[in-house]
Amino acid sequence: MIEAVTFDWGQTLVQFEWDDGLLAAGHRAGLEALGRGAEADAFTRRFRDELLPGFVRGADYEALLRDELGLDDGALRAYLAAEHRVWEPNIALLGSAHALLEALRARGVRLGVVANHWPEPAWIVRDEIERLGVAARVDAVVLAGEVGARKPDPAIFERALAELGVDATAVLHVGDRLEEDVAGAAALGMTTAQALWFDADDTPAGVEPDYLAFTPMDVLNAVRRLAP
């Protein structure tokens, strides 16, 4: 019996459409917020040519900015806020997200967001979840930057289970990534659904999702079967 559904954030409940121009625009906005706009072009060139090739998903973006730009906590926060404002127009909530969450809540299912988030820090993502109206529709928001662990680490899922007050076997986790979402959740005994409406991740993960969700309606249908 499913008592709760947890969702990944990026490329599951929201889609981020990246284009190369956002890199330079974000750097410029961040540095202009610090009165250092004249440094923007040089920083972008160095970032593209020297830093980006070795900058893997999940790497510490805040530490990179501190080191490369010599930022203290206040300056770093101002930089990141300005950079993210440039990116915001390219971040779109899943069109049926609110309807899906409300339909699940109407069935008495508890809801949570469990997100790795990158490169944005947790405070920006939490603000985004609130701004897009999702925080008001879920019972828990668990972010990697606040937990100190990233999916597929069990610690982040365990935090969500604790906040929702449910056992792993009573939870359906929905996410787009096979390793982080499907394998990570399955390792704790959670039922899994791979969200395919934005991306179709095919990275080998050693485990298959219990459900393939081509549309958000597939998630609702899975819950209907699991929690009649």
Image: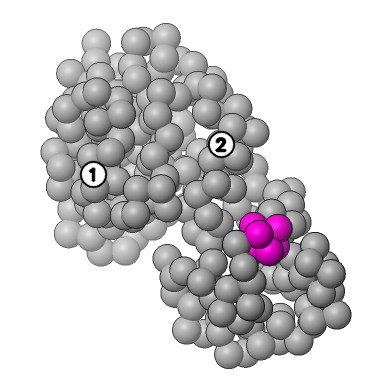
Circles 1 and 2, Cβ within 8 Å, touching? The answer is no
From the viewer's side, name the closer residue of 56 and 1: 56
Measuring from the top left, give residue 43's x and y in whole percent: 71, 82
Measuring from the top left, give residue 67's x and y in whole percent: 56, 79
Magenta span of residues: 74-79
Q: Is residue 14 left or right of residue 225?
A: right
> What residue would you read off at disc 2?
129
Which residue sits at x=69%, y=54%?
Answer: 81
Q: Name the quadrant of the N terminus.
A: top left
Q: How many numbered discs, if any? A: 2
For the residue marked with disc 1, what is the amino acid? Ala
Name which of mark 1 and mark 2 comes first in the sequence: 2
For the residue marked with disc 2, what is the amino acid? Ile
> What residue would you read off at disc 1?
185
Looking at the picture, does residue 60 appear above or below residue 176?
below
Which residue sits at x=65%, y=78%?
Answer: 69
Q: SS at mark 1?
A: helix
Which residue sits at x=25%, y=19%?
Answer: 3
Measuring from the top left, give residue 14's x and y in whole percent: 55, 42
Does residue 77 show up magenta in the picture? yes
